[in-house]
Image: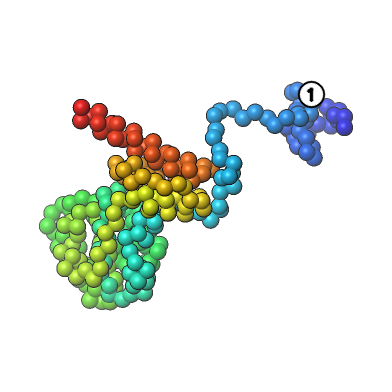
Amino acid sequence: MTPKRREEHRANPTGTVLIDRVYDDELGRFEDDEPEIEGNFELDLEEAAPPSDRPEAVTAVVGAAFNAATTADQRRRLRHNQALCAIVHVPSPVWVIPVSLYFRCAFGEQWLQQTRHGPTPGERGFATSSASVSLALSAGQSVVGIAADLSLLPRSLIGAADMTIRIAPPNGAVLKAAITRFTARAPVELDDAVLAELDLDDLVAAFRPGTGAQRIAQRLAAAGAALRATINLKGG
């Protein structure tokens, strides 16, 4: 095949695809080789086409942690309930909003949520929240409190709780389940000690599109080592 005349290519931009070969106007010839990509990109071949229906990273981590903290019967009660009062104890304040969003998506909009990141200013705020919980329960609405410090939740919610769910910091088994959800592939076993210093934001940062399960596990291990080194340096 011979190149077409330049006049015939004026309407086409540089690099126009002609069947299975590419003609480059600047080079004045067809390119036979794959073009080089600038930059240092790493892509696992087995993960070149990640599943299109995978959850977001934070949803994968929170969902795996929530399932590990509950039984199938508890989750069924949360989905089909009336006037149920629940408490979700999360590992740290950064978990509060992600768990709140996950809970609403998984168990419906009918729940009145009380979320606490830190102390509510003034006693009046606590009294108002406590009254809203009481009124909601007495009207047949379900209520859930989500906090890292349960003492920050309204008093009436603590006293009326039918169920308390304690989400522990994710261990190796939970993170393995989260990675499997995100990539549809299971990594090797993760060492619990490697994950000890990692909070939710640190965990989610290791989940990136286009990389495989094992690469995520390696990032988690590297993040744990880096944070431990920083803590040891400060302690020294």
Q: Is residue 228 visible?
A: yes
- Identified by mark 1, the residue type is Gly
Along the viewing direction, whichever of 153 and 193 lies nearer the viewer: 193
Left or right of 168 on screen, residue 173: right
The residue at 65%/28% (across/down) is: 36
Q: Is residue 145 above or below residue 93?
A: below
The residue at 27%/65% (across/down) is: 144
Residue situated furthest top in the rendering: 27
In the rendering, at what x and y percent does residue 64 appear?
Answer: 39, 56
The residue at 34%/41% (across/down) is: 194
Q: Is residue 19 above or below residue 51?
A: above
Quadrant showing the C terminus = top left
Along the viewing direction, whichever of 16 and 22 lies nearer the viewer: 22
Locate residue 11: give its quadrant: top right
Along the viewing direction, whichever of 40 and 236 lies nearer the viewer: 236
The residue at 31%/35% (across/down) is: 227
